[in-house]
Image: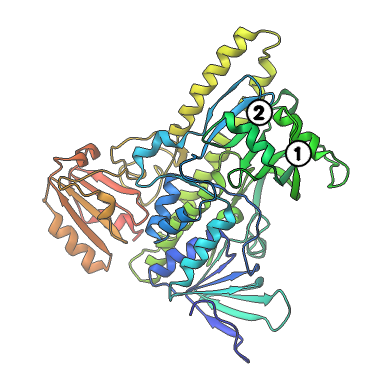
Amino acid sequence: MNERKMMTGEMERQADVVVVGGGPVGTGLAIELGQRGIRTIVVERYPTPQRVPKGQNLTQRTMEHFHFWGAEKELRAARTVPKEYGIGGLTAYGTLLGDYHYDWLQRELVRPYYFTDNERLPQYATEDVLRARAAEIDAVETLYGYSGEAIEEDEGGVTVTAAPRDGGAPVKVRARYLVGCDGSKSAVRDMAGITQTRSDHDRLMVLLVFRSTGLHELLKRFPGKSFYNVLHPDLKGYWQFFGRVDLGNTWFFHAPVPADTTKDNFDFTGYLHRAVGAAFDVEFEHIGFWDLRVAIADSYRTGNVFIAGDAAHSHPPYGGYGINTGFEDARNLGWKIAATLQGWGGENLLDSYDAERRPVFASTAKDFIEKAIESDRAFLETHDPDCDRAAFEREWTARGSGARDEVNAFEPNYRGSPIVTGAGGQTNAIGGHTFKARPGHHLAPRKMSNGENVYDRLGSGFTLLALGGEDGVERFEAAADEAGIPLTIVMDDAAGETSDYGARYVLVRPDQFVAFAGDALSPDLLVHATGR
């Protein structure tokens, strides 16, 4: 039984890892750890997920995580927009129903380089699936309705005091490691003394959740679209963003509003009508506000305390980067904590979490999110169809092509990682998709000579792909056995698609990133890849 109520007089729990914050990232991390046999306790303040439809776009890479977490089928079944409708997006100029628009964030362009299709559904539906999966894993225990109130760290680990939100005696959870996944206002981050660097855009944003069948009727002209970005000259590059929660009824909307806006002093219905360019029925379910800023922790680790997800980095919900970046944090950190606790990870392995993940977010924020705002601002200041329609249309067409290029260019990688061999360069989010196996990059799926996909053969630990070569494989396997490193050997003659990898040997990490690719094999590669 994984969700355990407190017994009378039971005031302390023991675990290997305590995760404070049981949202999507925290629960995903608990699943990653629990599947590896790591005893994990999740402390989450909300008994049930909050029904605010944020974090909807899930990339192909994120869906690979759900595949390996054993929850891909369940997640797709929870989808709120029928699969046959589509989940694409568009960018419009002036108003949503105006004369100019192009396809935006076309994830399908990079589909061949991932094992799974992308997906779209409200974050609370994703959390429901994750909670159900966590409940199936014996090594995972959940304390719902509890908040992390205090932490005490010593050389041997961390003690978290968790207090029930509805009153009652607090619980102490003792673990070797603590991971704060408790959001952008993270109490764990603050209690651990981890500072942040912020880029404040001095913009108040509104989040509206509303019902409207009329808007669905208006947008039937854009079949297969589920999210819509409106660029308006008055907003200086900041977006008006509509998203479907379901098909035909419920929507959400993000946009800038004046700094003194409240729920009661602003015409939100009129704002929606102006953004769309037509009147329609509106029934509000939620009106909330947030400040537009980018924040990144100055470290993702201090001692035995780590942070992940929004606790480590936060940004405006532009492009669906946030929740996907958080899930990648969970996969990266999960196998490294497990390796350390199980004795096959070296003393430098945990430090590589910060070295790999923090530069990726810094690049995501700078090179994609803030760059998009700056680019949109410059475009809106320079081009106006009322002044020079021909010049505007040329640039608008070019922007449509650029939107396709951006999808290919967003390729988070660990080229500068201390545990990757033969990569070179800097760790960032800028790359390009290719089938070639490149150290520090995500491994693309390929079919083997027998028709099997390589991804169906990857182990939960390291996997060595021996593609047309066996020199040194036996010695490599013996070295892994001696060090207790979980290793799966996959042999192929590289007569099929695996020849695209361009190397005789590819060492794949537990998170499907390439640790090494080359034509000569040495046991030292394992030593390096595990931080020993």
Image position of 361 with respect to 339: above or below: above
- Which residue: 40% across, 47% down? 417
**Most foreground residue, 314 or 175:** 314
Report whether residue 199 is seen: no
Report whether residue 322 is seen: yes
- Which residue: 75% across, 48% down? 284
Q: Residue 225, image x and y in percent?
A: 54, 35
User: Which image quarter holds the C terminus?
Assistant: bottom left
Q: Amino acid at mark 1?
A: Asp
Q: Residue 116, image x and y in percent?
A: 38, 47
Q: Amino acid at mark 2?
A: Leu
**Most foreground residue, 74 or 429:** 74
Nearer-N-terminus badge (2/1):
2
Q: Residue 289, image x and y in percent?
A: 75, 47
Q: Secondary structure at mark 1?
A: strand
Marks 2/1: CA distance?
25 Å
Question: Left or right of 347: which side holds 30?
Answer: right
- Which residue: 74% across, 43% down? 206
Q: Residue 412, image x and y in percent?
A: 44, 42
Seen from this angle, which residue lies furthest right?
A: 265
* The label number, if any, that marks residue 477 in the structure image: none
Closer to the camera: disc 2 or disc 1?
Answer: 2
Q: Secondary structure at mark 2?
A: loop
Q: Where does label 2 land, which residue?
A: 96
Q: How many marks?
A: 2
Image position of 61 with respect to 373: above or below: below
Disc 2 and disc 1 in contact, CB within 8 angstroms: no
* The label number, if any, that marks residue 202 in the structure image: 1
Query: What colouring method underlies this structural image?
Result: rainbow
